[in-house]
Image (cartoon, rainbow, N blue to C red):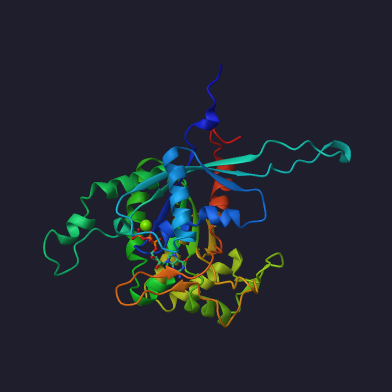
Amino acid sequence: MQPEPARGRPGHNISMWGAPGSGKTTLLAALFIALARRNDDWKIIGSDPASSDYLIEKTNALSRGKVFPEASMTLERYHWTLIGPAPRRSGFWGRKAKPGPPTRIGISMIDAPGGLFGTGRRPAGAPSGVAAAADGAGDPRRQELLDNLEQSRGIVFLFDPIREFTLGDAFDHMHAPLTRLAERMLAAGEFLDGKLPHHIAVCVTKFDDPRVLETAEKRRLLTTDIDDPHGVPRVTSEDAKELFRELCQVSASGNADMVLNALDQFFHADRIRFFATSSIGFYIDRRTKMFDWDDFQNMLPGEADEDSRIRGQLHPINVVEPMLWLGQRLAAIRPATEVS
Ligand SMILES: Nc1nc2c(ncn2[C@@H]2O[C@H](COP(=O)(O)OP(=O)(O)OP(=O)(O)O)[C@@H](O)[C@H]2O)c(=O)[nH]1
Ligand SMILES: [Mg+2]
């Protein structure tokens, strides 16, 4: 009897890429809730016990404990399968086609501490050994991260507008790994048409923050989905690039526009898609069940050295969509053995 391939490791590797604190781990933690809040048949299932444990623990911490994940210290790899409705098929001569098997998209997700995306150089004046130990160029985790980026064909790239506004280091966390990745792909003969072979979902995170929402409002980029019972404002993928561009204007270092240029230079235009994302979403009053412009903040900033917390229920925005877009695009170009 043939071994059952669907039980194996999913074949599409997707890496998370973003500066420290940009929201990578929270986005993964919100994935289960994001799927559960959708009105369709997509679900996420762990492909091994550790990956299921992660989904259970992180979902509980966010939705019951109302706490954000701790800053990541290690490189974590999770194996999940997204299972969704069967692709639509048309029958012959107007007859109804029999429903096919459900769509299955296997993803291996790599979540690393954001510091590993930095240049790995010690900040000027720092005592020797300090940064090098935590974040140094010789750190074996940095090599592992690059190996993963090289093997993956999908990237979820997180741009944190709040961090960019205060620290302005998104480009610093992009250019070193991008340069090294390009060097490796060139050597491997995978840079033939002058671009990387990866698909990249660019997520502008923390869309629920008033500063981000107001920027989108001022630029008239907001819309509401007619099917959304809560009337939550959103930015479509078509307009999310404009939001990114607008947020670049307030970068503390003035370097954020180089992130946008680097994306255009290194990735095929039809392999980049922008998303305005919030893992926690807006606060929705449980009585009115409607978005309220006068009371929408779902993040409770911590006092003094307390951590920030989540105020109400989670209503993730554009958390599933980047994963589904990447999964479907990768399954279309490179069907994995496990994808039926
Ligand atoms: N407003 C808002 N804040 C968020 C959201 N997601 C994360 N945050 C904030 O960002 C912080 C960092 O989030 P993480 O998910 O740990 O970020 P990370 O990219 O995994 O960070 P490292 O593991 O250190 O690289 C959280 O503690 C929250 O304060 C969001 O959807 N909205
Ligand atoms: Mg993390």
The furthest residue to the left: 128
Q: Is residue 303 left or right of residue 15?
A: left
Relative to the observer, which residue lies in front, 227 or 265? 227
- Residue 173 locus on image (x, y percent): 34, 62
Vertical order, 156 against 192 (above or below):
below
Q: Is residue 41 left or right of residue 79?
A: right
Relative to the observer, which residue lies in front, 232 or 257? 232
- Residue 259 locus on image (x, y percent): 41, 65
Rendering quarter of residue 125: bottom left
Rendering quarter of residue 134: bottom left
Image quarter hosting the C terminus? top right
Image quarter hosting the N terminus? top right
At 63% from the left and 41% from the top, the residue drawn is 103
At 49% from the left and 75% from the top, the residue drawn is 212
Vertical order, 224 against 329 (above or below):
below
Q: How many marks?
A: 0
Is residue 224 visible to the viewer in this orientation of the structure?
yes
- Residue 303 locus on image (x, y percent): 34, 77
Q: Is residue 296 left or right of residue 62?
A: right
Where on the image, by quarter, is ligand 2?
bottom left
Q: Is residue 172 left or right of residue 67?
A: left
Vertical order, 15 against 71 (above or below):
above
Relative to the observer, which residue lies in front, 130 or 148? 130
- Residue 155 locus on image (x, y percent): 46, 52
Is residue 186 visible to the viewer in this orientation of the structure?
no
